[in-house]
């Protein structure tokens, strides 16, 4: 099972100096991937923990690609209805091309009412918009000539399609993952939270004549307790999780690196 590590692209930790130091520490300690999240319009009454400060996801991943060499770069998750499909496809392809095919694209449909209002998008349309964007992304990475709004155009560069992991809870997220994605990306406080849904996901992919995709879970580990961490990792692995993304609380690179080293010892 691969281990990814979260980096805070929000709040006081989202400085150029701290984010770059964290990404380089993850790479230096040979973890598989670094992950950031996505918000673009936090209202004042919901800004606790971030102060409303968020770095744009795809822009930040492009920047991280330029200061790292090996570590994979994950969006956990990019909210599809917030963005127009064609510019998003171009940005995704650019990050994938310039990173040397290191992008892992987690996507979601969003939940925060205030962000949808700020964007002028009806929240209840988010599922439909997401499905249309996913279909368009898959088409763009499948062939050089693509059509949008009746206009044929060349989609270049066209690197390898990054794995597209569909975030969210069952049943809708696993149905979307089986139809459009290359894997499922749930949050799971404990392994048992996803075990039954994983069986259903495999049934859906089999019915669609697809190979079951990669299962990535986001969770927190008690890194200070190595025995408990090892037990949790074994349990996630046993239910079929392929990658676990570990969230870390920190204010300094020293705190961040210390927890990485604790986790590394537990592995």
Image: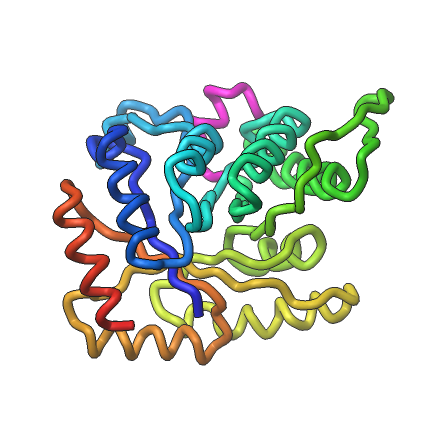
Q: Is residue 117 left or right of residue 165?
A: left
- Residue in view at x 15 percent, y 56 percent: 258
- Residue in view at x 40 percent, y 40 percent: 37
Q: Tell me residue 6's x, y (percent).
A: 33, 49
Instruction: Classify 79 as above or below 229.
Output: above
Q: Is residue 118 left or right of residue 92?
A: left
112 falls in the magenta region: yes
Q: Tell me residue 175's x, y (percent).
A: 65, 57
Residue 17 visible (yes or no): yes
Residue 112 visible (yes or no): no
Q: Quadrant of residue 14?
A: top left
Instruction: Classify 248 as above or below 229.
Output: above
- Residue in view at x 29 percent, y 79 percent: 231
- Residue in view at x 23 percent, y 58 percent: 260
Q: Is residue 200 left or right of residue 243?
A: right
Q: Is residue 216 left or right of residue 174?
A: left
Instruction: Classify 125 as above or below 150.
Output: below
Instruction: Classify 206 as above or below 123.
Output: below
209 falls in the magenta region: no
Q: Tell me residue 141's x, y (percent).
A: 72, 41
Image quadrant occupied by the C terminus: bottom left
The residue stretch that appears in magenta: 110-121
User: Quick one: 68 or 14, which is closer to the camera?
Assistant: 68
Q: Tell me residue 105's x, y (percent).
A: 54, 45
């Amino acid at each position: 099972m691969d281990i990814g590590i979260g980096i805070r692209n929000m709040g006081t930790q989202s400085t150029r100096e701290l984010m770059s130091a964290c990404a380089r520490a993850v790479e230096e300690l040979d973890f598989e991937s670094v992950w950031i999240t996505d918000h673009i319009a936090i209202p004042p009454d919901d800004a606790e923990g971030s102060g409303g400060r968020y770095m744009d996801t795809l822009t930040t991943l492009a920047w991280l690609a330029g200061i790292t060499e090996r570590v994979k770069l994950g969006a956990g998750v990019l909210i599809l209805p917030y963005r127009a499909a064609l510019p998003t496809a171009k940005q995704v392809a650019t990050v994938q091309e310039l990173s040397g095919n290191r992008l892992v694209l987690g996507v979601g449909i969003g939940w925060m009412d205030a962000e949808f209002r700020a964007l002028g998008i009806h929240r209840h349309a988010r599922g439909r918009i997401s499905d249309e964007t996913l279909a368009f992304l898959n088409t763009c990475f499948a062939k050089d000539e693509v059509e949008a709004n009746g206009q044929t155009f060349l989609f270049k560069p066209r690197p390898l399609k990054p794995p597209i992991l569909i975030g969210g809870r069952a049943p809708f997220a696993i149905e979307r993952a089986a139809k459009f994605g290359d894997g499922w990306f749930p949050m799971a406080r404990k392994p048992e939270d996803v075990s039954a849904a994983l069986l259903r996901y495999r049934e859906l992919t089999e019915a669609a004549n697809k190979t079951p995709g990669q299962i990535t879970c986001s969770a927190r580990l008690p890194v200070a307790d190595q025995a408990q961490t090892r037990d949790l990792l074994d349990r996630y692995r046993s239910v079929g999780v392929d990658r676990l993304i570990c969230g870390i609380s920190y204010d300094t690179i020293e705190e961040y690196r210390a927890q990485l080293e604790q986790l590394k010892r537990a592995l």
